Image (cartoon, helix red, strand yellow):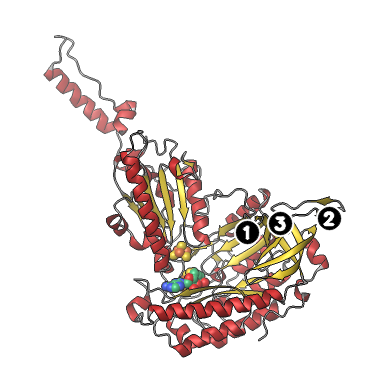
Amino acid sequence: MFLLKNKNYIIQPLKCLLVSKTCRCYSDSVRLVSMKNKLKNGPGLKNFIESSTHPIMVDRPYIPYLANVEYATKRKVYFDIYGCQMNLNDTEIVWSILQNEGFERTEVEDEADIFLVMTCAIREGAETKIWHRLDHLRGFKKRREVSKFKQRPVKIGILGCMAERLKEKLIEKEKAVDVVAGPDSYRDLPRLLALTDSGQTAVNVLLSLDETYADVVPVRLNQDSVSAFISIMRGCDNMCTYCIVPFTRGRERSRPVSSIVDEVRRLADQGVKEVTLLGQNVNSYRDITEHTVKHETKLAEGFKTVYKSKMGGLRFADLLDKVSSVDPEMRIRFTAAHPKDFPDEVLQVVAERANVCKLLHLPAQAGSSAVLQRMRRGYSRAAYLALVRRAAAAVPAVGLSTDMICGFCGETEEEFQETLSLLEIVDYNIAFLFPYSMREKTTAYRRYKDDVPEDVKKERHSRMLNVYRRKCQMLNEAEIGNTHLVLVEGSVKKTGQLMGRNELYIKVVFDQEEILTEDGGKRSVKPGDYVAVRIVSAKASVLSGIPLYHTGIREFYRHVSWADRGTARVPL
Ligand code: SAH
Ligand code: SF4
Ligand code: F3S
Protein backbone atom coordinates (compact mmCIF):
# COMPACT_ATOMS: atom_id res chain seq x y z
CA MET A 1 0.00 0.00 0.00
CA PHE A 2 2.85 2.32 0.89
CA LEU A 3 4.61 1.63 -2.42
CA LEU A 4 1.52 2.26 -4.48
CA LYS A 5 0.60 5.53 -2.91
CA ASN A 6 4.01 7.19 -2.70
CA LYS A 7 5.11 8.40 -6.13
CA ASN A 8 8.81 7.91 -5.32
CA TYR A 9 8.34 4.21 -5.27
CA ILE A 10 5.99 3.58 -8.18
CA ILE A 11 7.61 1.02 -10.53
CA GLN A 12 6.85 2.03 -14.15
CA PRO A 13 6.27 -0.68 -16.77
CA LEU A 14 9.67 -1.11 -18.53
CA LYS A 15 9.94 -1.08 -22.36
CA CYS A 16 13.01 -1.61 -24.65
CA LEU A 17 13.36 1.37 -27.01
CA LEU A 18 15.33 -0.57 -29.63
CA VAL A 19 12.95 -3.37 -30.41
CA SER A 20 9.82 -1.66 -29.21
CA LYS A 21 8.81 -4.69 -27.22
CA THR A 22 9.64 -5.63 -23.74
CA CYS A 23 13.33 -6.50 -23.65
CA ARG A 24 14.46 -8.67 -20.80
CA CYS A 25 18.14 -7.57 -20.54
CA TYR A 26 17.31 -3.89 -20.66
CA SER A 27 14.43 -4.16 -18.31
CA ASP A 28 16.53 -6.25 -15.88
CA SER A 29 19.32 -3.66 -15.66
CA VAL A 30 16.85 -0.80 -15.29
CA ARG A 31 15.04 -2.77 -12.70
CA LEU A 32 18.31 -3.28 -10.81
CA VAL A 33 19.06 0.47 -10.79
CA SER A 34 15.52 1.20 -9.82
CA MET A 35 15.71 -1.30 -7.00
CA LYS A 36 19.01 0.21 -5.76
CA ASN A 37 17.48 3.70 -5.79
CA LYS A 38 14.43 2.38 -4.09
CA LEU A 39 16.50 0.87 -1.31
CA LYS A 40 18.54 4.09 -1.02
CA ASN A 41 15.55 6.38 -0.89
CA GLY A 42 13.05 4.06 0.68
CA PRO A 43 12.15 3.68 4.30
CA GLY A 44 14.94 2.62 6.63
CA LEU A 45 14.87 1.23 10.13
CA LYS A 46 14.50 4.71 11.51
CA ASN A 47 11.15 5.10 9.77
CA PHE A 48 9.89 2.10 11.62
CA ILE A 49 10.84 3.43 15.02
CA GLU A 50 10.43 7.13 14.35
CA SER A 51 7.78 9.16 16.17
CA SER A 52 5.90 11.99 14.62
CA THR A 53 3.81 14.55 16.44
CA HIS A 54 0.09 14.69 16.13
CA PRO A 55 -2.28 17.54 17.06
CA ILE A 56 -3.71 15.80 20.10
CA MET A 57 -1.58 12.74 20.50
CA VAL A 58 1.99 13.80 20.93
CA ASP A 59 3.46 10.34 21.14
CA ARG A 60 1.56 8.55 18.45
CA PRO A 61 4.03 6.36 16.60
CA TYR A 62 4.57 6.95 12.88
CA ILE A 63 3.93 3.64 11.20
CA PRO A 64 5.06 3.75 7.56
CA TYR A 65 3.11 0.73 6.39
CA LEU A 66 -0.03 2.36 7.72
CA ALA A 67 0.89 5.95 6.91
CA ASN A 68 -1.44 6.21 3.98
CA VAL A 69 -4.19 4.02 5.23
CA GLU A 70 -7.37 5.96 5.63
CA TYR A 71 -7.93 5.24 9.31
CA ALA A 72 -11.52 6.22 9.07
CA THR A 73 -13.64 6.58 6.01
CA LYS A 74 -16.21 8.42 8.09
CA ARG A 75 -17.01 5.24 9.92
CA LYS A 76 -19.68 5.50 12.56
CA VAL A 77 -18.97 4.38 16.09
CA TYR A 78 -21.57 3.27 18.61
CA PHE A 79 -20.51 3.28 22.26
CA ASP A 80 -21.79 0.89 24.91
CA ILE A 81 -20.67 1.86 28.40
CA TYR A 82 -20.60 -0.40 31.45
CA GLY A 83 -18.97 0.01 34.86
CA CYS A 84 -17.98 3.03 36.88
CA GLN A 85 -17.85 6.76 36.16
CA MET A 86 -14.24 6.36 35.14
CA ASN A 87 -15.42 4.33 32.19
CA LEU A 88 -17.70 7.16 31.15
CA ASN A 89 -14.79 9.58 31.26
CA ASP A 90 -12.55 7.09 29.42
CA THR A 91 -15.17 6.81 26.68
CA GLU A 92 -15.03 10.59 26.30
CA ILE A 93 -11.25 10.30 25.88
CA VAL A 94 -11.70 7.54 23.28
CA TRP A 95 -14.30 9.62 21.47
CA SER A 96 -11.92 12.59 21.42
CA ILE A 97 -9.18 10.43 19.87
CA LEU A 98 -11.47 8.90 17.26
CA GLN A 99 -13.19 12.15 16.38
CA ASN A 100 -9.80 13.66 15.63
CA GLU A 101 -9.20 10.81 13.22
CA GLY A 102 -12.42 11.53 11.33
CA PHE A 103 -14.72 8.95 12.85
CA GLU A 104 -18.35 9.86 13.46
CA ARG A 105 -20.58 8.85 16.33
CA THR A 106 -24.04 7.37 16.18
CA GLU A 107 -26.60 6.49 18.80
CA VAL A 108 -28.57 4.35 16.33
CA GLU A 109 -27.43 0.71 16.21
CA ASP A 110 -28.43 0.24 12.58
CA GLU A 111 -26.18 3.08 11.46
CA ALA A 112 -23.10 1.76 13.26
CA ASP A 113 -19.99 0.40 11.53
CA ILE A 114 -18.07 -0.12 14.76
CA PHE A 115 -19.37 -1.08 18.19
CA LEU A 116 -17.04 -0.17 21.02
CA VAL A 117 -17.98 -1.74 24.33
CA MET A 118 -16.39 -0.09 27.37
CA THR A 119 -16.34 -2.93 29.88
CA CYS A 120 -16.12 -3.58 33.62
CA ALA A 121 -14.68 -6.61 35.41
CA ILE A 122 -15.37 -5.75 39.03
CA ARG A 123 -17.82 -8.61 39.66
CA GLU A 124 -18.91 -11.66 37.70
CA GLY A 125 -22.35 -10.10 37.31
CA ALA A 126 -20.87 -7.10 35.51
CA GLU A 127 -19.16 -9.40 33.02
CA THR A 128 -22.27 -11.55 32.52
CA LYS A 129 -24.18 -8.48 31.38
CA ILE A 130 -21.45 -7.72 28.86
CA TRP A 131 -21.43 -11.30 27.52
CA HIS A 132 -25.18 -10.94 26.89
CA ARG A 133 -24.57 -7.72 25.01
CA LEU A 134 -21.87 -9.45 22.96
CA ASP A 135 -24.34 -12.20 22.05
CA HIS A 136 -26.59 -9.53 20.63
CA LEU A 137 -23.75 -7.80 18.77
CA ARG A 138 -22.57 -11.10 17.26
CA GLY A 139 -26.04 -11.60 15.84
CA PHE A 140 -26.07 -8.06 14.49
CA LYS A 141 -22.68 -8.58 12.83
CA LYS A 142 -23.82 -11.86 11.20
CA ARG A 143 -27.00 -10.25 9.86
CA ARG A 144 -24.92 -7.44 8.35
CA GLU A 145 -22.61 -10.02 6.69
CA VAL A 146 -25.45 -11.78 4.92
CA SER A 147 -27.44 -8.65 4.21
CA LYS A 148 -28.36 -8.21 0.53
CA PHE A 149 -27.91 -4.44 0.75
CA LYS A 150 -24.14 -4.13 0.45
CA GLN A 151 -23.53 -2.60 3.85
CA ARG A 152 -20.07 -2.20 5.34
CA PRO A 153 -19.09 -5.03 7.67
CA VAL A 154 -19.50 -4.35 11.35
CA LYS A 155 -16.47 -4.38 13.68
CA ILE A 156 -16.63 -5.02 17.42
CA GLY A 157 -14.08 -3.61 19.84
CA ILE A 158 -13.86 -4.45 23.54
CA LEU A 159 -12.27 -1.75 25.67
CA GLY A 160 -11.68 -1.24 29.38
CA CYS A 161 -11.26 -3.49 32.38
CA MET A 162 -12.70 -6.74 31.03
CA ALA A 163 -10.51 -6.35 27.93
CA GLU A 164 -7.50 -5.98 30.19
CA ARG A 165 -8.50 -8.92 32.37
CA LEU A 166 -9.17 -11.41 29.57
CA LYS A 167 -6.79 -10.10 26.89
CA GLU A 168 -6.52 -12.42 23.81
CA LYS A 169 -8.82 -14.92 25.53
CA LEU A 170 -11.67 -12.58 24.67
CA ILE A 171 -11.14 -13.17 20.97
CA GLU A 172 -10.73 -16.90 21.48
CA LYS A 173 -13.94 -17.04 23.47
CA GLU A 174 -15.92 -14.55 21.40
CA LYS A 175 -14.99 -15.00 17.75
CA ALA A 176 -16.97 -11.95 16.67
CA VAL A 177 -14.59 -9.57 18.48
CA ASP A 178 -12.14 -7.67 16.23
CA VAL A 179 -10.31 -5.37 18.66
CA VAL A 180 -9.30 -5.69 22.31
CA ALA A 181 -7.87 -2.55 23.92
CA GLY A 182 -7.00 -2.09 27.60
CA PRO A 183 -7.41 1.17 29.56
CA ASP A 184 -3.91 2.44 28.71
CA SER A 185 -3.97 1.83 24.96
CA TYR A 186 -6.72 4.12 23.72
CA ARG A 187 -4.28 6.27 21.73
CA ASP A 188 -3.61 3.18 19.67
CA LEU A 189 -7.26 2.60 18.77
CA PRO A 190 -7.20 4.24 15.30
CA ARG A 191 -4.33 1.92 14.32
CA LEU A 192 -5.99 -1.13 15.86
CA LEU A 193 -9.21 -0.37 13.99
CA ALA A 194 -7.28 0.16 10.74
CA LEU A 195 -5.76 -3.29 11.11
CA THR A 196 -9.21 -4.84 11.20
CA ASP A 197 -9.86 -3.47 7.69
CA SER A 198 -7.80 -6.31 6.31
CA GLY A 199 -9.71 -8.83 8.36
CA GLN A 200 -7.16 -9.09 11.17
CA THR A 201 -7.93 -8.99 14.86
CA ALA A 202 -5.91 -6.50 16.90
CA VAL A 203 -5.00 -6.53 20.58
CA ASN A 204 -3.22 -3.96 22.75
CA VAL A 205 -3.46 -4.54 26.47
CA LEU A 206 -0.16 -3.03 27.57
CA LEU A 207 -0.44 -1.22 30.89
CA SER A 208 1.55 1.95 31.33
CA LEU A 209 3.35 3.55 34.24
CA ASP A 210 2.72 7.10 33.09
CA GLU A 211 -0.24 7.30 30.70
CA THR A 212 -2.79 9.79 32.05
CA TYR A 213 -4.18 11.10 28.72
CA ALA A 214 -3.45 14.53 30.20
CA ASP A 215 -3.10 16.08 26.73
CA VAL A 216 -6.29 14.55 25.32
CA VAL A 217 -9.27 16.84 25.76
CA PRO A 218 -12.25 14.56 26.42
CA VAL A 219 -15.27 15.24 24.23
CA ARG A 220 -18.42 14.99 26.31
CA LEU A 221 -20.86 12.38 25.08
CA ASN A 222 -23.80 14.31 26.44
CA GLN A 223 -23.15 17.92 25.60
CA ASP A 224 -26.39 18.97 27.32
CA SER A 225 -25.46 17.51 30.68
CA VAL A 226 -24.96 20.03 33.47
CA SER A 227 -22.32 17.83 35.08
CA ALA A 228 -19.05 16.23 33.99
CA PHE A 229 -16.47 13.74 35.27
CA ILE A 230 -12.75 14.35 35.29
CA SER A 231 -10.23 11.57 35.95
CA ILE A 232 -7.46 13.08 38.03
CA MET A 233 -5.49 9.87 38.33
CA ARG A 234 -5.44 6.33 36.97
CA GLY A 235 -4.71 2.90 38.40
CA CYS A 236 -4.50 1.79 42.01
CA ASP A 237 -1.66 0.60 44.23
CA ASN A 238 -3.77 -0.53 47.14
CA MET A 239 -4.23 -4.20 46.35
CA CYS A 240 -7.29 -4.84 48.49
CA THR A 241 -7.39 -8.63 48.42
CA TYR A 242 -10.84 -8.89 46.77
CA CYS A 243 -10.29 -6.34 44.03
CA ILE A 244 -9.41 -6.76 40.36
CA VAL A 245 -8.88 -3.03 39.66
CA PRO A 246 -5.09 -2.92 40.27
CA PHE A 247 -4.78 -5.70 37.66
CA THR A 248 -7.04 -4.08 35.08
CA ARG A 249 -5.97 -0.47 35.51
CA GLY A 250 -2.36 -0.88 36.55
CA ARG A 251 -0.21 1.26 38.79
CA GLU A 252 -1.39 4.50 40.30
CA ARG A 253 -0.36 7.71 38.51
CA SER A 254 -1.64 11.28 38.80
CA ARG A 255 -2.41 13.76 36.10
CA PRO A 256 -0.75 17.20 36.43
CA VAL A 257 -2.74 19.84 38.33
CA SER A 258 -2.45 22.32 35.45
CA SER A 259 -4.17 20.03 32.93
CA ILE A 260 -6.99 19.30 35.39
CA VAL A 261 -7.53 22.98 36.20
CA ASP A 262 -7.52 23.81 32.46
CA GLU A 263 -10.18 21.20 31.87
CA VAL A 264 -12.34 22.51 34.71
CA ARG A 265 -12.04 26.02 33.27
CA ARG A 266 -12.99 24.80 29.80
CA LEU A 267 -16.02 22.98 31.22
CA ALA A 268 -17.07 26.06 33.21
CA ASP A 269 -16.89 28.08 29.97
CA GLN A 270 -19.16 25.52 28.32
CA GLY A 271 -21.74 26.08 31.06
CA VAL A 272 -21.06 22.90 33.07
CA LYS A 273 -22.19 23.44 36.66
CA GLU A 274 -20.79 20.43 38.45
CA VAL A 275 -17.61 18.38 38.10
CA THR A 276 -16.72 15.17 39.89
CA LEU A 277 -13.01 14.46 40.30
CA LEU A 278 -12.37 10.76 39.87
CA GLY A 279 -9.68 8.42 41.14
CA GLN A 280 -9.60 5.04 42.85
CA ASN A 281 -8.17 6.83 45.86
CA VAL A 282 -8.08 10.60 45.38
CA ASN A 283 -6.31 11.11 48.69
CA SER A 284 -3.14 9.58 47.35
CA TYR A 285 -3.13 12.05 44.45
CA ARG A 286 0.34 13.59 43.89
CA ASP A 287 1.36 15.89 41.08
CA ILE A 288 5.07 15.25 41.18
CA THR A 289 5.68 17.53 38.19
CA GLU A 290 5.18 20.41 40.65
CA HIS A 291 8.14 20.89 42.95
CA THR A 292 7.16 21.75 46.49
CA VAL A 293 8.22 21.05 50.02
CA LYS A 294 8.30 17.35 50.67
CA HIS A 295 5.16 16.75 52.68
CA GLU A 296 5.17 13.20 53.87
CA THR A 297 1.80 11.50 54.00
CA LYS A 298 1.16 10.91 57.69
CA LEU A 299 -1.48 8.27 58.25
CA ALA A 300 -3.81 8.80 61.18
CA GLU A 301 -3.51 6.42 64.09
CA GLY A 302 -4.92 3.00 63.27
CA PHE A 303 -4.36 3.22 59.49
CA LYS A 304 -1.64 1.58 57.44
CA THR A 305 -0.78 1.25 53.79
CA VAL A 306 0.72 -1.48 51.62
CA TYR A 307 2.93 0.87 49.62
CA LYS A 308 5.53 3.45 50.49
CA SER A 309 3.93 6.88 50.90
CA LYS A 310 4.74 9.28 48.13
CA MET A 311 6.72 12.42 48.87
CA GLY A 312 6.72 15.91 47.40
CA GLY A 313 4.53 17.42 44.72
CA LEU A 314 1.02 18.84 45.00
CA ARG A 315 -1.47 16.81 46.98
CA PHE A 316 -5.23 16.36 46.70
CA ALA A 317 -5.95 19.21 49.15
CA ASP A 318 -3.93 21.55 46.87
CA LEU A 319 -5.78 20.30 43.79
CA LEU A 320 -9.18 20.67 45.47
CA ASP A 321 -8.26 24.18 46.50
CA LYS A 322 -7.29 25.14 42.93
CA VAL A 323 -10.19 23.38 41.24
CA SER A 324 -12.79 24.90 43.56
CA SER A 325 -11.35 28.36 42.92
CA VAL A 326 -11.95 28.20 39.15
CA ASP A 327 -15.63 29.10 39.38
CA PRO A 328 -17.34 29.64 42.74
CA GLU A 329 -20.66 28.76 41.09
CA MET A 330 -19.45 25.34 39.99
CA ARG A 331 -20.10 22.44 42.33
CA ILE A 332 -17.14 20.17 43.01
CA ARG A 333 -17.48 16.53 44.04
CA PHE A 334 -14.84 13.83 44.35
CA THR A 335 -14.70 10.05 44.66
CA ALA A 336 -13.35 7.63 45.88
CA ALA A 337 -11.37 8.37 49.01
CA HIS A 338 -9.73 5.44 50.76
CA PRO A 339 -10.31 5.87 54.52
CA LYS A 340 -6.68 5.04 55.27
CA ASP A 341 -5.32 8.40 54.21
CA PHE A 342 -7.92 11.09 54.69
CA PRO A 343 -5.94 14.16 55.70
CA ASP A 344 -7.33 17.05 57.76
CA GLU A 345 -6.26 19.48 55.01
CA VAL A 346 -8.84 17.95 52.64
CA LEU A 347 -11.55 18.12 55.31
CA GLN A 348 -10.66 21.75 55.83
CA VAL A 349 -11.06 22.65 52.13
CA VAL A 350 -14.39 20.77 52.07
CA ALA A 351 -15.57 22.68 55.14
CA GLU A 352 -14.42 26.10 53.94
CA ARG A 353 -15.47 26.12 50.30
CA ALA A 354 -19.18 26.63 49.70
CA ASN A 355 -18.94 25.00 46.26
CA VAL A 356 -17.27 21.78 47.47
CA CYS A 357 -20.15 19.42 48.21
CA LYS A 358 -20.37 18.23 51.79
CA LEU A 359 -20.71 14.57 50.90
CA LEU A 360 -17.76 12.33 51.66
CA HIS A 361 -17.50 8.90 50.09
CA LEU A 362 -15.81 6.78 52.75
CA PRO A 363 -15.98 3.19 51.50
CA ALA A 364 -15.91 1.02 54.61
CA GLN A 365 -16.30 -2.34 52.77
CA ALA A 366 -17.02 -4.20 56.04
CA GLY A 367 -17.79 -3.57 59.69
CA SER A 368 -15.66 -6.30 61.21
CA SER A 369 -11.97 -5.68 61.92
CA ALA A 370 -11.15 -9.31 61.14
CA VAL A 371 -12.83 -9.10 57.72
CA LEU A 372 -11.16 -5.73 57.07
CA GLN A 373 -7.84 -7.34 57.80
CA ARG A 374 -8.51 -10.21 55.37
CA MET A 375 -9.52 -7.59 52.83
CA ARG A 376 -6.19 -5.79 53.48
CA ARG A 377 -7.94 -2.46 53.91
CA GLY A 378 -5.37 -1.07 56.34
CA TYR A 379 -7.81 -0.02 59.11
CA SER A 380 -9.93 -1.49 61.86
CA ARG A 381 -13.59 -0.80 62.63
CA ALA A 382 -12.50 1.50 65.47
CA ALA A 383 -10.13 3.49 63.21
CA TYR A 384 -12.88 3.86 60.60
CA LEU A 385 -15.34 5.14 63.21
CA ALA A 386 -12.70 7.57 64.50
CA LEU A 387 -12.37 8.93 60.94
CA VAL A 388 -16.15 9.37 60.68
CA ARG A 389 -16.07 11.34 63.94
CA ARG A 390 -13.12 13.43 62.73
CA ALA A 391 -14.94 14.19 59.46
CA ALA A 392 -18.13 15.14 61.32
CA ALA A 393 -16.20 17.47 63.61
CA ALA A 394 -14.37 19.15 60.73
CA VAL A 395 -17.36 19.42 58.39
CA PRO A 396 -20.54 20.05 60.39
CA ALA A 397 -23.59 18.22 59.04
CA VAL A 398 -21.38 16.29 56.64
CA GLY A 399 -23.09 13.70 54.45
CA LEU A 400 -21.56 10.27 54.04
CA SER A 401 -21.64 7.55 51.44
CA THR A 402 -20.03 4.13 51.42
CA ASP A 403 -19.44 0.82 49.64
CA MET A 404 -19.97 -2.46 51.53
CA ILE A 405 -19.35 -6.05 50.58
CA CYS A 406 -21.07 -9.02 52.20
CA GLY A 407 -20.08 -12.67 52.02
CA PHE A 408 -16.33 -12.13 51.65
CA CYS A 409 -14.17 -15.24 52.13
CA GLY A 410 -14.69 -16.72 55.59
CA GLU A 411 -17.28 -14.12 56.68
CA THR A 412 -19.20 -15.55 59.65
CA GLU A 413 -22.70 -14.49 60.67
CA GLU A 414 -21.16 -12.59 63.63
CA GLU A 415 -18.76 -10.73 61.35
CA PHE A 416 -21.61 -9.86 59.01
CA GLN A 417 -23.61 -8.56 61.99
CA GLU A 418 -20.82 -6.01 62.48
CA THR A 419 -21.35 -4.73 58.93
CA LEU A 420 -25.06 -4.39 59.68
CA SER A 421 -24.28 -2.53 62.89
CA LEU A 422 -21.96 -0.13 61.03
CA LEU A 423 -24.82 0.63 58.65
CA GLU A 424 -27.00 1.27 61.71
CA ILE A 425 -24.50 3.47 63.57
CA VAL A 426 -23.27 5.66 60.73
CA ASP A 427 -25.87 7.74 58.92
CA TYR A 428 -25.00 6.97 55.31
CA ASN A 429 -26.97 9.02 52.82
CA ILE A 430 -25.89 6.76 49.99
CA ALA A 431 -24.49 3.23 50.07
CA PHE A 432 -23.47 0.82 47.32
CA LEU A 433 -23.92 -2.69 48.66
CA PHE A 434 -22.48 -5.75 46.95
CA PRO A 435 -22.39 -9.50 47.45
CA TYR A 436 -18.79 -10.68 47.15
CA SER A 437 -17.70 -12.03 43.79
CA MET A 438 -14.41 -13.91 43.59
CA ARG A 439 -12.05 -12.59 40.90
CA GLU A 440 -9.15 -14.54 39.47
CA LYS A 441 -5.65 -13.08 39.99
CA THR A 442 -6.58 -11.31 43.23
CA THR A 443 -4.90 -12.20 46.52
CA ALA A 444 -8.19 -13.54 47.84
CA TYR A 445 -8.33 -15.94 44.87
CA ARG A 446 -4.88 -17.26 45.69
CA ARG A 447 -5.08 -17.19 49.48
CA TYR A 448 -8.68 -17.68 50.59
CA LYS A 449 -11.70 -19.80 49.86
CA ASP A 450 -14.90 -18.33 48.46
CA ASP A 451 -16.76 -20.31 51.09
CA VAL A 452 -19.89 -18.28 51.81
CA PRO A 453 -22.64 -20.06 49.82
CA GLU A 454 -24.36 -17.98 47.14
CA ASP A 455 -27.76 -18.15 48.87
CA VAL A 456 -26.21 -16.86 52.12
CA LYS A 457 -24.53 -14.00 50.23
CA LYS A 458 -27.88 -13.18 48.64
CA GLU A 459 -29.66 -13.26 51.95
CA ARG A 460 -27.02 -11.05 53.65
CA HIS A 461 -27.19 -8.66 50.72
CA SER A 462 -30.92 -8.22 51.13
CA ARG A 463 -30.52 -7.72 54.89
CA MET A 464 -27.99 -4.95 54.21
CA LEU A 465 -30.35 -3.37 51.70
CA ASN A 466 -33.19 -3.45 54.23
CA VAL A 467 -31.20 -1.64 56.91
CA TYR A 468 -29.91 0.86 54.37
CA ARG A 469 -33.36 1.64 52.94
CA ARG A 470 -34.90 2.02 56.39
CA LYS A 471 -32.11 4.40 57.43
CA CYS A 472 -32.39 6.40 54.19
CA GLN A 473 -36.12 6.78 54.66
CA MET A 474 -35.48 8.09 58.18
CA LEU A 475 -32.72 10.48 57.15
CA ASN A 476 -34.72 11.81 54.22
CA GLU A 477 -37.84 12.32 56.34
CA ALA A 478 -35.74 14.40 58.72
CA GLU A 479 -35.18 16.81 55.82
CA ILE A 480 -38.88 17.67 55.49
CA GLY A 481 -39.27 21.39 56.11
CA ASN A 482 -35.61 22.14 55.27
CA THR A 483 -34.64 24.19 52.23
CA HIS A 484 -32.11 22.59 49.90
CA LEU A 485 -29.94 24.02 47.15
CA VAL A 486 -30.79 21.96 44.07
CA LEU A 487 -28.89 21.90 40.80
CA VAL A 488 -31.49 21.11 38.14
CA GLU A 489 -30.51 18.31 35.74
CA GLY A 490 -33.63 17.78 33.61
CA SER A 491 -37.08 16.33 33.85
CA VAL A 492 -38.51 12.99 34.93
CA LYS A 493 -39.88 11.17 31.89
CA LYS A 494 -42.82 9.55 33.66
CA THR A 495 -44.18 12.54 35.56
CA GLY A 496 -42.81 15.51 33.66
CA GLN A 497 -41.60 16.98 36.95
CA LEU A 498 -38.20 18.65 37.16
CA MET A 499 -35.34 16.70 38.73
CA GLY A 500 -32.12 17.88 40.31
CA ARG A 501 -29.73 16.92 43.07
CA ASN A 502 -29.03 18.43 46.41
CA GLU A 503 -25.64 18.91 48.03
CA LEU A 504 -25.63 15.24 49.14
CA TYR A 505 -26.38 13.95 45.62
CA ILE A 506 -29.92 12.97 46.57
CA LYS A 507 -32.55 13.36 43.88
CA VAL A 508 -35.05 16.15 44.47
CA VAL A 509 -38.16 16.42 42.28
CA PHE A 510 -40.57 19.34 42.03
CA ASP A 511 -43.16 20.84 39.67
CA GLN A 512 -42.24 23.39 37.04
CA GLU A 513 -43.19 26.88 38.20
CA GLU A 514 -42.27 30.47 37.50
CA ILE A 515 -40.23 31.48 40.51
CA LEU A 516 -38.42 34.59 41.70
CA THR A 517 -35.08 35.45 40.15
CA GLU A 518 -32.24 37.16 42.00
CA ASP A 519 -33.12 40.51 40.35
CA GLY A 520 -36.74 40.40 41.52
CA GLY A 521 -38.31 39.12 38.29
CA LYS A 522 -39.87 35.71 37.63
CA ARG A 523 -39.00 32.89 35.27
CA SER A 524 -39.47 29.15 34.88
CA VAL A 525 -36.80 26.62 35.77
CA LYS A 526 -34.40 25.00 33.31
CA PRO A 527 -31.50 22.51 33.52
CA GLY A 528 -28.36 24.14 34.93
CA ASP A 529 -30.32 26.42 37.28
CA TYR A 530 -29.69 26.47 41.00
CA VAL A 531 -33.02 26.52 42.80
CA ALA A 532 -33.88 26.73 46.50
CA VAL A 533 -36.39 23.95 47.13
CA ARG A 534 -38.39 23.39 50.33
CA ILE A 535 -38.65 19.66 51.02
CA VAL A 536 -42.23 18.50 51.61
CA SER A 537 -42.09 14.72 51.35
CA ALA A 538 -39.51 11.96 51.30
CA LYS A 539 -38.94 8.46 50.01
CA ALA A 540 -35.82 6.36 50.63
CA SER A 541 -34.14 7.51 47.43
CA VAL A 542 -35.91 10.72 46.43
CA LEU A 543 -37.13 13.93 48.03
CA SER A 544 -40.04 16.02 46.74
CA GLY A 545 -40.30 19.73 47.24
CA ILE A 546 -41.64 23.13 46.28
CA PRO A 547 -39.37 25.44 44.29
CA LEU A 548 -38.96 28.76 46.11
CA TYR A 549 -36.57 30.99 44.15
CA HIS A 550 -33.67 31.00 41.68
CA THR A 551 -30.34 31.36 43.40
CA GLY A 552 -26.62 30.59 43.21
CA ILE A 553 -24.19 28.81 45.52
CA ARG A 554 -22.83 32.01 47.11
CA GLU A 555 -26.23 33.65 47.30
CA PHE A 556 -27.92 30.60 48.84
CA TYR A 557 -25.34 30.09 51.55
CA ARG A 558 -25.49 33.78 52.47
CA HIS A 559 -28.98 33.06 53.78
CA VAL A 560 -28.97 29.38 54.67
CA SER A 561 -26.20 27.87 56.71
CA TRP A 562 -25.45 24.32 55.66
CA ALA A 563 -24.38 23.35 59.16
CA ASP A 564 -27.50 24.76 60.85
CA ARG A 565 -30.05 22.70 59.00
CA GLY A 566 -30.89 21.09 62.30
CA THR A 567 -30.23 17.51 61.23
CA ALA A 568 -27.58 15.65 63.17
CA ARG A 569 -25.90 13.53 60.51
CA VAL A 570 -23.53 11.40 62.54
CA PRO A 571 -24.97 10.55 65.93
CA LEU A 572 -21.96 8.63 67.15
N1 SAH B 1 -11.41 2.43 44.54
C1 SAH B 1 -12.70 2.48 45.03
C2 SAH B 1 -13.66 1.45 44.53
C3 SAH B 1 -13.52 0.82 43.27
S1 SAH B 1 -14.48 -0.56 42.95
C4 SAH B 1 -12.64 2.34 46.51
O1 SAH B 1 -11.73 1.79 47.04
O2 SAH B 1 -13.60 2.76 47.10
C5 SAH B 1 -16.08 -0.15 43.59
C6 SAH B 1 -16.55 -1.05 44.66
O3 SAH B 1 -16.79 -2.35 44.18
C7 SAH B 1 -15.60 -1.28 45.81
O4 SAH B 1 -15.60 -0.22 46.71
C8 SAH B 1 -16.13 -2.54 46.43
O5 SAH B 1 -17.14 -2.28 47.37
C9 SAH B 1 -16.77 -3.25 45.25
N2 SAH B 1 -15.99 -4.44 44.86
C10 SAH B 1 -14.72 -4.48 44.43
N3 SAH B 1 -14.35 -5.74 44.19
C11 SAH B 1 -15.42 -6.53 44.48
C12 SAH B 1 -15.66 -7.92 44.44
N4 SAH B 1 -14.72 -8.77 44.05
N5 SAH B 1 -16.87 -8.38 44.81
C13 SAH B 1 -17.84 -7.52 45.21
N6 SAH B 1 -17.67 -6.18 45.26
C14 SAH B 1 -16.47 -5.69 44.90
FE1 SF4 C 1 -9.87 -1.82 44.53
FE2 SF4 C 1 -8.99 -1.24 46.92
FE3 SF4 C 1 -7.95 -0.01 44.82
FE4 SF4 C 1 -10.44 0.56 45.57
S1 SF4 C 1 -8.59 0.95 46.76
S2 SF4 C 1 -9.72 0.12 43.51
S3 SF4 C 1 -11.16 -1.40 46.32
S4 SF4 C 1 -7.77 -2.17 45.28
FE1 F3S D 1 -15.31 -1.74 36.70
FE2 F3S D 1 -12.91 -1.09 35.97
FE3 F3S D 1 -14.49 0.70 37.06
S1 F3S D 1 -13.49 -2.99 36.88
S2 F3S D 1 -15.73 -0.50 38.43
S3 F3S D 1 -14.82 -0.30 35.14
S4 F3S D 1 -12.31 0.55 37.34
Placement of 184 over or under 390, stated as above or below: above
Q: Secondary structure at mark 2?
A: loop
Tell me the mark number nearer the camera, choosing from 2 and 1: 2
Which numbered disc, 3 or 1, marks the residue that appears first in the sequence?
Answer: 1
Residue at the disc numbered 1: 275
Tell me the mark number nearer the camera, choosing from 3 and 2: 2
Between the C-alphas of marks 3 and 1, the distance is 11 Å
Residue 394 picture location, percent across and down: 69, 78
Placement of 493 over or under 503, stated as above or below: above
Q: Is residue 188 left or right of residue 315?
A: left
Between the C-alphas of marks 2 and 1, the distance is 24 Å
Between the C-alphas of marks 3 and 2, the distance is 19 Å
Badge 2 crowding class, 10 Å Cα cut-off, few under 14, some 14 to 19, many 20 or more, is: few
Numbered mark located on residue 518 in the image: 2
Quadrant housing residue 173? bottom left
Q: Is residue 528 left or right of residue 306?
A: right
